[in-house]
Amino acid sequence: MDNQENILDLYYNKHLKQIDIATKVGVSKQYVSKVVKADSRFGQEKENRKVENATNRKSYMKEYFKTYTRPNKEDDFYEQLKAQLNQDTLELSYSCSNINDYAFAKWNRKMFEYDKHSSDLVLRNGITTGYNVPKRISNIVSVNIIRTNRMCV
């Protein structure tokens, strides 16, 4: 039996992959591909393998999801995010008036300036406000964070 007949036998009857046939026969994969594609049965065999692979993949995925368990993560990032969203909702809702001074300063950053002698934010001169607006917010952040915020604003 010559190489071409051997290749066709291994591909169509034994249903081996082209790379496996190339290794077994001792030729290149490109040669195996050329011989197989030249055969008249190639189109039908390709379609059959496609259907078979899809069926195998479907059954594999069905079994995989029956036994799949989500990895248990130890972090509580999602819970922290939910708590932060709840806090923000509470502070920014119209029905609630108990926003803390730091949150107010973050939302109205241009109203405050950094006091060079302490780590406080002080209301800028010339701004007229109501009684509930903080005039000074003490010890809220470090100097570096305030400088970073100033550049961003």
Image: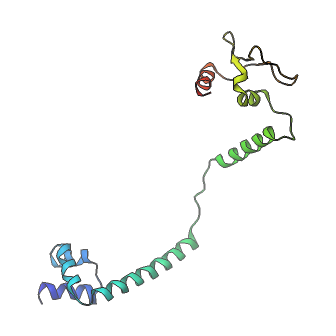
Q: Is residue 29 left or right of residue 105?
A: left
Task: Classify 33 as above or below 82.
Answer: below
Quadrant containing the N terminus in the rendered view: bottom left
Considering every residue shown, the one lying at the far left of the view is 2
- Image coordinates for residue 7, horizontal then vertical, percent: 19, 84
Q: Quadrant of the C terminus?
A: top right
Quarter of the image holding residue 5? Answer: bottom left
Residue at horizontal 24%, vertical 90%?
A: 40
Q: Position of residue 82 (x, y in %)?
A: 72, 47
Q: How many marks?
A: 0
Q: In the rendered view, tell whether residue 92 sits above or below residue 36.
A: above
Identify the residue at image location x=62%, y=19%.
143
Which residue occupies the foreground of this view, 152 or 39?
152
Q: Is 94 placed above or below 131 here?
A: below
Hey, which residue is sitting farthest top in the picture?
117
Q: Is residue 131 left or right of residue 54?
A: right
Residue 39 in the image, given as x and y percentages of width and height: 22, 88
Q: Residue at x 63, y 22 (%)?
A: 146
Q: Which coloring applies here? A: rainbow
Q: Quadrant of residue 117?
A: top right
Would you say 47 lies left or right of 2 here? right
- The residue positioned 58% from the left and 73% from the top of the image is 66
